Image: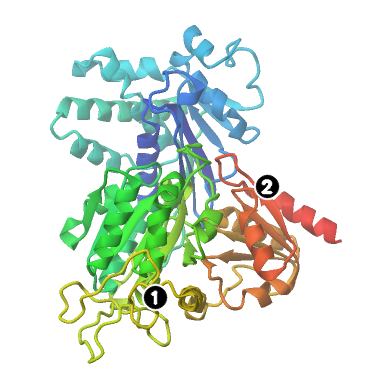
Amino acid sequence: MSSDIQVLESAVVRFAGDSGDGMQLTGSQFTTSTALSGSDLATFPDFPAEIRAPAGTTFGVSAFQINFGAKKIKTVGDAPDVLVAMNPAALKVNLATLRPGGMIVVDTGSFTKRNLQKAGYDANPLEDGSLEHYQLVELDATKMTVEAVKDFGLGNKEALRCKNMWTLGLMLWMFSRNRAPIIDWLKAKFAKLPDIADANIAALNAGHAFGETAELHSSIKRYTIGATKQEPGIYKTVTGSESLSWGLVAGSQLANLQIVLGSYPITPASPVLHTLSKMKELGVVTFQAEDEIAAICAALGAAYGGALGITSSSGPGIALKTEALGLAISTELPLVVVNVQRGGPSTGMPTKTEQSDLYQAIYGRNGDAPLPVISTRSPADCFEVAIEACRLATKYMTPVILLSDGFIANAAEPWKLPDMDALEPFPAKFVEEIGEDGFNPYKRDEETLARNWAVPGTPGAMHRIGGIEKSYDTGHISYDPANHQKMTDTRAAKVAGIAHDIPLQDVDQGAKSGKLAVVGWGSTYGPISEAVKAARAEGKDVSHIHIRYLNPMPSNMADLLAGFDHILVPEMNTGQLKTVLRDRYLVDATPLNKVSGQPFKITEIQAAINAALGEEG
């Protein structure tokens, strides 16, 4: 091993290639090795929208970015330090993301005339001087992979499928990561295909060995990044979809209820269905319905039957569920609706991230139909937020919308496994004894205004609920104008009252008053946090407020916002939270909007902070 290994505090690496090049697998295995080394990390899988885009085209490029370091990592990094480009299209699509002077590792074997044409290049960028401002590392990974696996009897197509492992081996060497976890994974994955396993291991080792020999005679250098300081405990690298699913199960157990998921596959929400379907041993029931409407109705029926109903989708699917969601509000049954937001409207950009369903969540139903809306800010945060959604749904007998997004769902970060015994239970309350006056399903708890919940079959508790307005006093159908006014007001008061049962809004960084507050929600947390941290390090009067409870908002929100001269609201839409804040608190919030399908960069928010403070000064 070379003695002049360069020590880095952090690094950002982006793997990019065709959707069939295994970039997501390469990135996830690099992530596994990095996590086991103790470095903190954040990842960003960037999928193409086309399922079967022609090989070598720009719209079929798949990428995986990881930011890892010996410090706390909150974002996936503004600009990669290293771009691994498996073909010309990957280079063309991702070059603009690379930092000035960054390293480009290219497979020269893929830079054929045909591939250059498909990527839209008039000339070979490896030869025309256009990359002279970067550190260019040219390797014929195609040729070296075929050579590494030639003893395993694979055809050319199968041999080339090992190229991602050769590249991974090189990057593991470059950043001093351990190969052993990947070798163990390959043996397990291809246990029934030992030749395939051995070929991939050989390619992995060959890429690693190339790095060991190349450092002696080229500009390729080796780096090391240490472990970050973490609280003692057991950690697992999780995606947002995984921790959200586990949080839903934990919430159902804390409520002492069975969980029933009714769902229909849709990008990027499908992993919630996939994860929960593997948890039958914990009493989880999953139902893949024929459409979105059937999915939410099945979950609502399960809630009527005494279970915790869950349904998951993305924006277009939530639109289809809207009528049944109104039914859930009218019947006042506990239901958690998970919306993993994506680029819209309509089909939009299914594999790209956005935060543009806030209006839909807060306002998007016919009639006056308020419900609680909460959001998660990171993959690890999903666990806690999912539990809270379950608590609110069961305590207040209401559907709850939980907002995630495509970035959070697919991104990954280390998560400290919680002590389940330390989590406070919130067992659901069912009506068990019926008084002399009979059963009124809309008799309410005086404090929460939650209605009675009786499991079908409870003696004396036969009742009917549905979408037609019911009498406040009897639970029977009612067209009385005064009763409808009372029921509408009561449902609204029930949701509004939740503000007294949630934490006061805190300030994530900075003072509770001052010149500027940067107010965000959801997955903008990381870049806002880093931008505010940098601004405060320069002595600027700026604070960061991040909102989890979007409806109702915490009871101190008005006073908190009033303490700042200016409010800046970065969000991945055209200004939805900004509008909500202006409506509720009459604050002149300034929007910072982005709807490119990509997360905010720290520098974008820094520039907006400087502009806001400059206008103030």
Which amino acid does the dot numbered 2 rest on? Glu
The residue to which callout 1 is attached is 396
N-terminal-most mark, 2 or 1: 1
- Mark 1: amino acid: Tyr
Please say whether residue 384 is visible from this viewpoint: no
Q: Nearer the viewer, residue 89 or 521?
A: 521
- The furthest residue to the bottom: 436
Q: Residue at x 54, y 51 (%)?
A: 75
* Residue at position x 21%, y 51% in the image: 278
The reply, left or right, for residue 318 in relation to residue 608 is: left
Percent of width and height locating residue 88: 51, 19
Q: Is residue 376 above or below residue 84?
A: below
443 lies left or right of 259: right
Q: Position of residue 381 (x, y in %)?
A: 44, 61
- Pick the residue in front: 87 or 459: 459
Q: In the picture shown, does residue 402 fall above or below 596?
A: below
Residue 123 is situated, as x and y percent measured from the top left of the image, at 60, 10
- Residue marked by disc 2: 604
Which residue is found at the position 83% from the left and 56% from the top? 614
Quadrant assignment for the C terminus: bottom right
**Residue found at x 66% / y 59%:** 579
**Location of residue 109 (image quadrant):** top left
2 or 1: mark nearer the eye: 1
Of residues 226 and 114, the one drawn nearer to the viewer in this rendering: 114
SS at circle 2 = helix
Look at the picture and state if 562 lies above or below 49: below
How would you rate the neighbour count of disc 2 (Cα within 10 Å): few for under 14, some for 14-19, many for 20 or more? some
